[in-house]
Image (tube, helix red, strand yellow):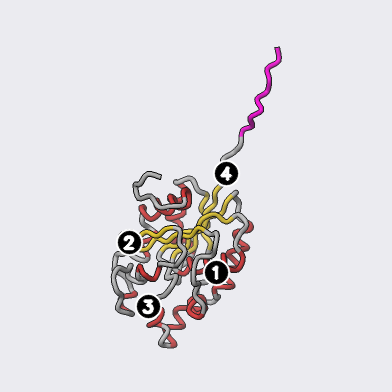
Amino acid sequence: MRHARSSLSLRSPRLETVIVLHGLWFQAAIVRPLCRRLGDAGFHAVAFGYPTMRRDLDHNARALAAFAARAPGDRLHFVGHSLGGLVLLRMIALAAPARLGRVVLLGSPCVDSRVVDVLSRWAAGRAILGAGIAQWRRAPMAAVPDGVAVAVIAGDRPWGLGQLVARLDRPHDGVVRVAETRLPGLADHLTLPATHAGLLFSREVARQTGAFLRHGRFDRGEDP
């Protein structure tokens, strides 16, 4: 007797890739702990390095788009820390990837930056901020583009070099005020106990980042 072959075929799970960007003055190695934690959560996480000082947002955004086009995965998510988040927003505005999934910004000064404003008053300050920040100051994004799921995790531990530059109203992470991260049109916003750099190393930040990438919302212990 011949047995009928099942009409159901085995399919491999969808590969969800996360591309993670570092912030100003850093290199790709700084985001590897976050990549490992996202990998433990079931994502294929890779770091994208870019010149934070010499090149403007447009150049880095196009390089990111080209990197994303070569990346494997059925869906591409993005995570950007600080300046990296501004590069992400610029890429979405210029050339959003066809496989674009969700986006999480970590401590990115989306709408303003008191520290940048103060440093920009002097030539030396402008020099250490670099070309990307200079372009962002001239034309910051007004809101999240339609149809794109972007969320922000901000820190509220007020320890950082930004306090040596400017007086910051609390809550802030030592560099960026929480209010400066509230870009209109965000899908979600969460404040966690972390400094600006500490956002990259916090287990809870990594967990919440994974929750938003997977479900489109942060995990606040609420029923769906």
Callout 1 amino acid: Arg
Within 10 Å of disc 3 (Cα), the crowding (few <14, some 14-19, many 20+) is many
Provide the residue designation for mark 1. 90
> Secondary structure under badge 1?
helix
Front disc: 1 or 3 = 1
Given residues 15 and 221, the one toward you in this image is 221
Residue farthest toward the right in the current orientation of the protein: 2
How far apart marks 1 and 3 lie (CA) works out to: 21 Å
How far apart marks 2 and 4 lie (CA) works out to: 32 Å
At x 30%, y 60%, the residue is 193
Please report whichever mark, 2 or 1, sits nearer to the chain's N-terminal start. 1
Please report whichever mark, 2 or 4, sits nearer to the chain's N-terminal start. 4
Front disc: 2 or 1 = 1
Q: Which mark is residue 194?
A: 2
Provide the residue designation for mark 4. 14
Tell me where the magenta segment starts and ends, as one range: 1-10
Tag 3–tag 4 contact (CB < 8 Å): no
Provide the residue designation for mark 3. 115
Asked whether residue 7 is drawn in magenta, I would say yes
Q: Is residue 179 visible?
A: yes
At x 40%, y 67%, the residue is 181
Tag 1–tag 3 contact (CB < 8 Å): no
Q: Is residue 211 above or below residue 178?
A: above
Callout 3 amino acid: Val
Callout 4 amino acid: Arg
> Secondary structure under badge 4?
loop
Tag 2–tag 4 contact (CB < 8 Å): no
Please report whichever mark, 1 or 4, sits nearer to the chain's N-terminal start. 4
In percent of width and height, residue 66 lies at: 63, 63
Please report whichever mark, 3 or 4, sits nearer to the chain's N-terminal start. 4
